[in-house]
Amino acid sequence: MQFSPLIEELIQALRCLPGVGPKSAQRMALHLLERDRQGGQRLSSVLARAMEQVGHCKNCRTLTEEDLCRICSSGRRNQNVLCVVETPADMLALEQSGVYDGRYFVLLGHLSPLEGIGPEDLGFDELLQRLKDEPVDEVILATNPTLEGETTAQYLVELLAGLPLKVTHLAHGIPLGGELEFIDGGTLSRAFAGRLGFATRKDSDG
Amino acid sequence: MQFSPLIEELIQALRCLPGVGPKSAQRMALHLLERDRQGGQRLSSVLARAMEQVGHCKNCRTLTEEDLCRICSSGRRNQNVLCVVETPADMLALEQSGVYDGRYFVLLGHLSPLEGIGPEDLGFDELLQRLKDEPVDEVILATNPTLEGETTAQYLVELLAGLPLKVTHLAHGIPLGGELEFIDGGTLSRAFAGRLGFATRKDSDG
Ligand SMILES: [Zn+2]
Ligand SMILES: [Zn+2]
């Protein structure tokens, strides 16, 4: 025996959520049906609007339902520094650490030949365009300290090598294999304060 | 900084799910927005239908979008035994153990003066009506082995004392404080096989 078709369908649908297996999905479905129909209806309606309306900031590519995110539309951010991150969650983690007052560029991923993700998917053209249009004199590469993140950073170092700006990365202190999103504010602060310049080809040649 | 208003609203709405704290809700929202819009849309639509259409079986009170659940509408179930459980999940656990071929009555809760849940909320009148209308000669009380579950069972023992039927409970072997829903089929089978009659007042008097 299973539950009725609609309840089984609900249990299946809940499994699109990360970390939710068959048993959790069943608990969630029964909880909503037995005790929180209003919460379930609200979730349904917010989900529909969010999946439909949330797009990307035209300037930094972070997730937002507005044309420009709050940071890009703020007049108070330092326009001379641009921090490149992989995801909106990474951007949030940096914001919550409170150490950074510049602007962002969100790659929405990292280079990954295996998954077929190349430079054209990560908005590198838009990034170059921003560096032409805006008075940026430092680009901080804050990709994750994973193999893909480091590869992406290295690619960007080469790409930006000819431009009249400093390219830095976050200081070591971030554990290898860790994900920025889960690192505490104190560690992030230290990593920001100790950020280093990249050794570009120009430097090694000279 | 937070996310944009609609994303924040989505994160809040996801917290109606049991076991989902602020950090999990954020991961879920970003996962759907970045990687599975289709899954999110499907979840929204199934949720809306389920919250609207799922009601209770007219006979046994379990959750279903149909008038009668599959068990109540089946001609193959033993009509002489009625098993009383607290929740639809308990009913499913017993069905999955495969030891029981009778029918059910689902209380949708247990007596709890603290939460203001009395006999009128648990369908005791409907239960008595069924015992009048159906050829039941054994009622198995399979409430949870918790304080509230035992209190509910004891109340039912008294309520059914005058009726011409046997009232049994599941054998010991179910761990105290445990929840039926999470007990394995083998333990449930043994508990079923060893079920005991209740000592009613009539028995103790005589
Ligand atoms: Zn932006
Ligand atoms: Zn039924």
Image: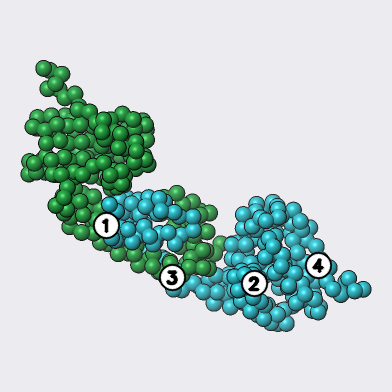
Chain colours: A cyan, B green
Q: Which residue is mark 2?
A: A113
Q: Are marks 1 and 2 on the same chain?
A: yes
Between tags 3 and 1, which lies in front?
A: 1
Residue at disc 3, CB closer than 8 Å to ligand 1 = no
Is residue B144 found left or right of A100 in the rendered image?
left
The residue shown at (52%, 59%) is B27
Between tags 1 and 2, which lies in front?
A: 2
Can residue B152 be seen by looking at this rendering? no
Q: Gap in Å between the C-alphas at discs 1 and 4?
A: 60 Å
Tell me the amino acid under the disc marked 1: Ser
Q: Secondary structure at mark 2?
A: helix
Between tags 1 and 4, which lies in front?
A: 1
Q: Gap in Å between the C-alphas at discs 2 and 4?
A: 24 Å
**Chain under numbered label 3:** B
Q: Secondary structure at mark 4?
A: loop
Q: Secondary structure at mark 1?
A: loop
Q: Nearer the viewer, residue B137 or B142?
A: B137
Q: Earlier in the sequence, mark 1 or mark 2?
A: 1
Residue at disc 1, CB closer than 8 Å to ligand 2 = no
Across and down, in percent, residue B83 comes to 21, 40
Between tags 2 and 4, which lies in front?
A: 2
Q: Which residue is mark 1?
A: A4
Q: Which residue is mark 4?
A: A198
**A148 lies above or below B18:** below
Q: Are marks 3 and 1 on the same chain?
A: no
**Chain under numbered label 2:** A
* Mark 3: few/some/many CA within 10 Å (<14, 14-19, 20+): few
On residue A15, the disc is none
Q: Are marks 3 and 2 on the same chain?
A: no
Q: Which residue is mark 3?
A: B38
